[in-house]
Amino acid sequence: MKYYFAPMEGITGYVYRNAHRKFFDQIDVYMTPFIVPTQNRKLTSREKNDILPEHNEGLYVIPQILTNKGEDFIWAAEEIKTYGYDEVNLNLGCPSGTVVSKNRGSGFLAYPDQLDHFLDQIFTALDMKISIKTRIGKESPEEFQRLLEIYEKYPLKELIIHPRVQTDFYKNHPNWDAFEKAVSGSTHSLCYNGDLFTSEAYDRFTNAFPQVDKVMLGRGLVANPGLAGEIKDGKKMEMERLKAFHDQILAGYEQTIPGERNVLFKMKELWAYMGQMFEGSEKQIKKIKKSQHLSDYREAVAHLF
């Protein structure tokens, strides 16, 4: 089994990825938070820093692109190629309202004919490996059959499927019946993504789909950075390792992000997930989230651990 780390905007940037690789080395592939091509045809400093080879040494990283315009995707892919990458991923999965309102991410799935034209355009123009991360539709699982037929027309490197529709966001259960359609009917190499938060959930998935040899972990892996290790060898993550991981990220953000408040904001984003690891510690988690200065924050974290 290969383990992929899902891209999560604002969280899984290069500082986080490097810290994760240092303390938890079970992930095979890291995907970057999405890059959005702009009219000025320039990567932002954040996007550039995130894909710089020197910021990703020793990591297998795949940059992800979010757009519904073929010419923009082609430009971004060619630009990314100049940094030494030979593979990019198309985001057709993001359910965010601000993304979907522009018919990007999973919003693009509502326009299958346009999507088909888009894919024809980029596969004709680019000499790169292209994978897709997709949901199963915009509003209904019935949309997935048409989407699968479109995907089958193109030489995808792989197809990563989160079997929810956009309107589900992260509610309801992943639709394994829809995923089974891909397993039985697609010729593409498949990767599964969706609600693998525990080793028990992973076991249920592999028992149901033993032929699938790649899984993508996202929210569950941010909540429990040692999840892939627990799945592989059954050992629970030590709190000392989690603390060292946390400290490495904090130090990295202090070096790369200007301003105490901005560093605190980034760290508090992590605790929205990692706080789930500390049952019965709601009081300390609340202190972390209410801290206004790094000194208060460090004190609250020290008490928690």
Image (cartoon, rainbow, N blue to C red):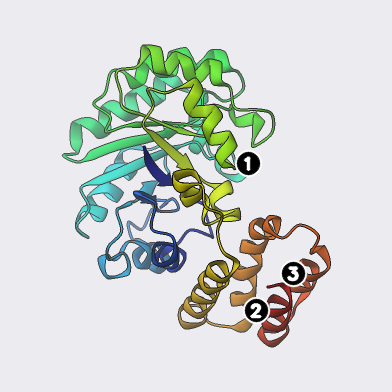
Q: Which amino acid is tagged 2? A: Arg
Q: What kind of element bears circle 3?
A: helix
Q: What kind of element bears circle 1?
A: helix
Q: Residue at 55% across / 20% down in the picture? A: 176
Q: Position of residue 287 (x, y in %)?
A: 79, 73
**Outermost residue toward the bottom?**
295
| Left or right of 25, for residue 303 | right
Q: Position of residue 227 (x, y in %)?
A: 52, 50
The residue at which mark 3 appears reads as 289
Separation (CA) of disc 1 from disc 3 = 25 Å
Q: Position of residue 239 (x, y in %)?
A: 60, 67
Q: Is residue 191 visible?
A: yes
Q: Are marks 2 and 1 in contact (CB under 8 Å)?
A: no
**Looking at this view, is 186 or 42 the one in front?**
186
Q: Which amino acid is tagged 1? A: Gly
Question: 83 above or below 156?
Answer: below
Residue 193, numbered circle: none
The residue at which mark 1 appears reads as 97
Q: Earlier in the sequence, mark 2 or mark 1?
A: 1
Q: Position of residue 291 (x, y in %)?
A: 75, 77
| Left or right of 198, for residue 133 | left
Q: Earlier in the sequence, mark 1 or mark 3?
A: 1
| Left or right of 200, for residue 83 | left
